[in-house]
Amino acid sequence: MKEQEFKGMDVLSNAQKTETLPCDLNITGCSPNNFLNISEEIDANLVPYNAPSAITTSIEITSTLLSDLGVPGASTIGLLLGKLINLLWPGGENDKSVWTSLLNESEELVNQKIKHITVITNAETALRGMHRVLQSYRSALNSWINPKGERISPEAMRTTYISALTTLNNSMASFSVPKHELPLLTLYSQAANIYLYVAKDITIFGKEWGFTYRNPEREGDIEFYYNEFLKYTAEHSEYCIDWYNQGLNQLSQSNSRDWVKYNKYRREMTIMVLDIISLFSSYDGFLYPQKTKTELTRMIFTNPIVYEGKQQYTWHQLAPSFSEIEDSAVPKPDYFRVLRNLLIHTKSYGSGVSATNYWSSHDLTYSLTNTPIYHQVSFGNKSTNGDDKYNNFSLSGRDVYKIISIARQNGPSYTDFIVNQFEMQTLNTSNAKNVLSYNHPSEWSNRQTFDSTTELPVTTNPPTTYGDDKQYSHRLGFISEVQHSSSRPNLIPIYGWTHTSVNLDNRIYSDRITQIPAIKSSPDLGGNFQNIAKGPGFNGGYVTTARSVNALVDVLKLQVTLDQNSLAQKYRVRLRYASNKRVPATLFTNTSGDYKFELQPSEVAPNPPYTKYQSFRYIDIPGLVSFTSTTDVVTVYLDMRYAPVGSYVEVDRIEFIPSNEIAELEKSLEKMKQAVNALFAEGRNVLKLDVTDRQIDMLSNLIDCLPEDVEPSEKRNLLNAVRYAKRLSQSRNLFIDSDFKLFNTGNGWSGSQSISISEGNILFKGPYLRLLGSNDDGSIPTYLYQKIDESKLKAYTRYKVRGFIGESKDLELYIVRYDGNTHTVMNVPRPRISPSIVMDSCGIPDRCKTHIEFDVSDTLSTDGSSSDPHAFSYHIDIGDMDLNENLGIWVIFKISTPDGYATLGNIECVEEGPLVGGALAQIKKKEQKFKEKIIEIRANTQRIYTEAKQAINNLFTDPPQDTKLKLATSLVKILEADGIAQRIPEIYNQWLYNIQGMNYSLFQELNTRIYQALELYTLRNLVQNPRFLDELSNWNVTSNVSVQQISGIPVLVLSNWDAQVKQRIVLKEDCGYILRVTAKKEGVGAGNVNISDCVGNAETLIFTSCNDKSTNISFNYDTQSIEFFPDAEQVYIEITESEGTFYIQNIELFLMRE
């Protein structure tokens, strides 16, 4: 098979062009008589005679649903339900013929007969119950929509609706019996369809029937039943696709017989199951509040056209393997193709009774949807052997809805299989019927006739309206091959069919929602596409994909068509997709320009492959799109340059939703009024508790952005009310300096110097803070804090701390009182905002033109609740007041990672109300435990303080003046005293190192004296760099000596017997000195520290692994001292070892007296 591309040229050269005959059959050698001859033959050996009734009914159900998806109108909904009932129960409650046909067909496909009578009995009982409740619901619905007398009451309608849902939902278990899931799958899909078709009515009639909306105390009935509808839409879709795949995968896949069964299963289960569930997503009346046009882009294949007679050989003995047939017959996932032309090459073979003409190869010419560039793909044997005849069939502008084909086999060897005749029945765009005939003589007597309508039935025969899927559901879309021979007559063609719901001109309608699958894109229009994927199976076709690369990637590019009267209409545009990351995206049209938006990761099963129903989500693209021409190109591309590594996106479809500007303006104004009213408690002097400062800011922005068509006084009144609400919000906020004007002045918020204060952000109306990450190792966090003073609080009261985060990573929040705290780590992604922020003429972000996905109905609902994922809110309870202790409330934000970050604002602390009941008892218990703990802490503090003070006194000869160290005072003893002081509790705030704790002043007193001791110690030591803080500075060393950090302390390390370390020191003659060394020896041998002068005086300290080790702060190091009396000014300290490893921590040399 080979493929080529060409534009604006005929399929054949002049020498090959065929003649258009008077019978309007564009075929060489064709005449009306030829047509009559083939018609006479098609009655013989027709295989089979009729399509299964399960297929016919399933096609009719799908076509019925496709005609009225969405909310086409109340009366239509009632009529459609009646049609579905009559299709499934044509003879009433006890007529199970359709359901039996569905069951029999699936049993045959999966080769599993249900033998347990209880399974059948339970299913039949469930079906009777479903019919009764459906009829009751249908009758009530008709009475509500078109009452002939007194209208049924809302209460009765609610009761009937709930009863129908309950019965239908309970019935589902009868069609999902363990170990019988596959044969029952066709019943399950139809039952699920009926259930969801009824369940969706909550989105259409729920308010009229008196179902309640959500309120602060409880979830509303409408939300409850709508969530149930969404849950079961996902559940039933996934169940059907999972079991469809299991059934397909368990079929044998070895040879041609297996492939025929495999292909039949795929074709018929697509019609009976997958086509049905692909419509579920369009039942949602909230998403699709008007009539909706959808399309099924999948392709299915009828059986191979090959003689199946019972001769010695069948084609199966000579057929390729399963995988070879699949590769040849079924194209890999690709963009939707429109068949434009069929060119058949005919050859001659044999002589006498063995003479025949046969279809030897063919060329298909196709285009991608609504584009003028043609592509060609070829099948079969195109060798020059034999006399080639060319039969050319132009298929542009016409649908082939039925094909009658004749296949033959030769004798006596029976090894060759051919097709020499067919009739293609067509209907063109002018609704004119036509027959295209292929008819070449053959003497082969073994023949068989195939009628495509026995596999894909035609509802209206012949159809009268082009493209009407209620009259004929499929059109010829592809012809491939099962096999062919390069030397013998042996091509076996197979027909591929697409659904007639697909508009070939990508038409956008002004009176309904138009769904256009992304697979109808055309790379021939330009752009940078990546790949096509099979998709999840419940969306009716393939999907376009994009992976993270450093480039712009197209996922949709459509040449769309509009009627002239549609040009005045504006459209909202929506995308259905799945993604695992946030990905910047752009919608572009030739006439409307760019619309920036951002794909958000899927909330359910966000990692590919996207097999879960809820992996796919919707995004409303900002703004309204209009068209000025009846043709335009619509493009959606992703900026993968700025997408995270590993990003993967699948796009299902784009949707164009007609916008009623006047109605939407009135709706927006009404929403604003409701939102403003929802800010206040009764009397408008107090804000509702749950109204946040952020919500007030955003509502102000939304009112600012109301169109100019709004009456100015209406807009002014709304803004005045919101300004008043803002003043009330600021007055009740217990935080000082909510706009950060006094930052780091000691009055209000304090924090790291790296924190910046910004304004003019698209997310924040007022000032906001930007926090960066910590230092590289995280030891110095970025922090922000404020303490609410005890005097501002009330006893036994609950307070709420809340705010808004633009985006954050590793942002920690602590809300602290007593010894407990609220602690959370907040990682908040960027909001769904246009990657390119629109600036006004002054360079300020234009909030009205830059899209943020902010729905006032969600974020500012009438009950004051917030569903904004960027908002945080936590409460803290206060017990009794103690102004002396002044515990207050500490609120701390902290980032302890180098790559952390945050933007935040609208931080507030508000009084929620007095504590009662269990909360009151709990805080009293916590308060009592805290008081007991404070007493314990103070007693422990006094004990440690006394111990540390005594240890420090022992360092000096004159405490507390602390002017001179004792001779016995070593670095070890100083560090030991410091270690005791460090044990004092509550020196610093346990959550932030630079906030002073309750014992900070006590510790600081001790710490000052310890620093004095260290200073005196340093001054008296005559050794330079004695603690190796400057590595090997001031020491002469050999190459195999190093300073290592061990437990955070620098240590001199000698690990070879020939290592030497030496320092020269100038001393006073005739004075006594003390040499003190802290060191340890590991392994065999000894470590030596020698001091000597130039006239023969020397002393040595010897360390071995057998020395007693101290258990002090020096970590098992040994401290030794020796007196030395030099007779010369210059002395040398030399460090060596015999073998093993020698560690030296500190060396002191000082006068015995001063």
Image (tube, rainbow, N blue to C red):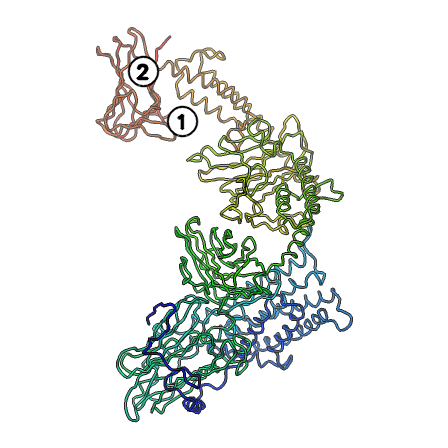
Question: Which residue is at 63% across, 39% downward?
Answer: 876
Foreground pick, 566 / 939: 566
Q: Which residue is mark 2?
A: 1122
- In the displayed structure image, the side of residue 33 where residue 703 appears, left or right: right
Q: Position of residue 355 (x, y in %)?
A: 30, 90
Question: Which label number is shown at residue 1111?
Answer: 1
Quadrant of the rendered structure where residue 496 is?
bottom left
Q: Amino acid at mark 2?
A: Ile
Comes first in the chain, label 1 or label 2: 1
Q: Position of residue 204 (x, y in %)?
A: 65, 63
Quadrant of the rendered structure where residue 424 is?
bottom left
Whether residue 727 is visible to the viewer of this picture, yes or no, is: yes
Q: Quadrant of the N terminus?
A: bottom left
- In the displayed structure image, the side of residue 60 where residue 966 appears, left or right: left
Q: Quadrant of the C terminus?
A: top left
Residue 867 against residue 360 in the figure, above or below: above
Is the residue marked by circle 1 packed among few (<14), some (14-19), or many (20+) residues within 10 Å? few
Foreground pick, 325 / 74: 74
Residue 914 against residue 575 in the figure, above or below: above
Element on which disc 2 rests:
strand
Whether residue 931 is visible to the viewer of this picture, yes or no, is: no
- In the displayed structure image, the side of residue 1041 where residue 146 appears, left or right: right
Foreground pick, 558 / 1070: 558
Element on which disc 1 rests:
loop
Q: CA distance from mark 1 to mark 2?
A: 21 Å
